Image (cartoon, helix red, strand yellow):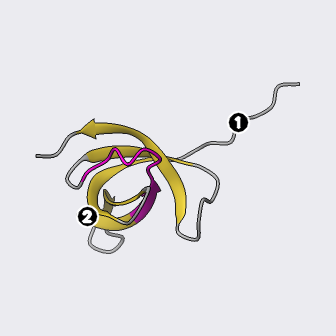
Amino acid sequence: MGEKQAHKRIIQGEVVSKAGEKSVTILVERKVVHPKYRKIVKRFKKYTIHDENNSAKVGDVITAIECRPISRNKAFRLKDIVLVGV
């Protein structure tokens, strides 16, 4: 029988800090409709991403994919760098 692959979330955001060796922090912005006022509002969340090669720099836009928990706060790893910051 075919095994079912678990759905892995992919997030995209801007690197806001180098959180130490092999780690970066990204800021993810998403737009949601406010339940009462029916207006589109921005919601922000920070994620700590595992960067094995230390290739991401502050200002880069990257995508990250969900993986097994690497530490207490890290459950995503770097997939690729979309846009290199200035």
Q: Viewed as shown, does residue 4 lie left or right of 67?
A: right
Residue at 70% x, 36% y: name it: 5
User: On screen, 84 above or below 31?
Assistant: above
Residue extending furthest left?
A: 86
Quarter residue 58 falls in: bottom left
Q: In which quarter of the image is the N terminus?
A: top right
On residue 5, which mark appears?
1
Q: Residues within 10 Å of mark 1 (few under 14, many from 20)?
A: few
Front one among 23 and 46: 23
Q: Where is residue 15 in the image (x, y as percent from the top left)?
A: 28, 56
Q: Is mark 2 on a helix, strand or loop?
A: strand
Quarter residue 35 falls in: bottom left
Q: Where is residue 43 in the image (x, y as percent from the top left)?
A: 31, 66
Front one among 12 and 53: 53
Front one among 35 and 59: 59
On residue 42, which mark appears?
2
Residue at 60% x, 49% y: name it: 67
Q: How many marks?
A: 2
Stretch of the chain drawn in magenta: 47-57
Residue at 62% x, 59% y: name it: 69
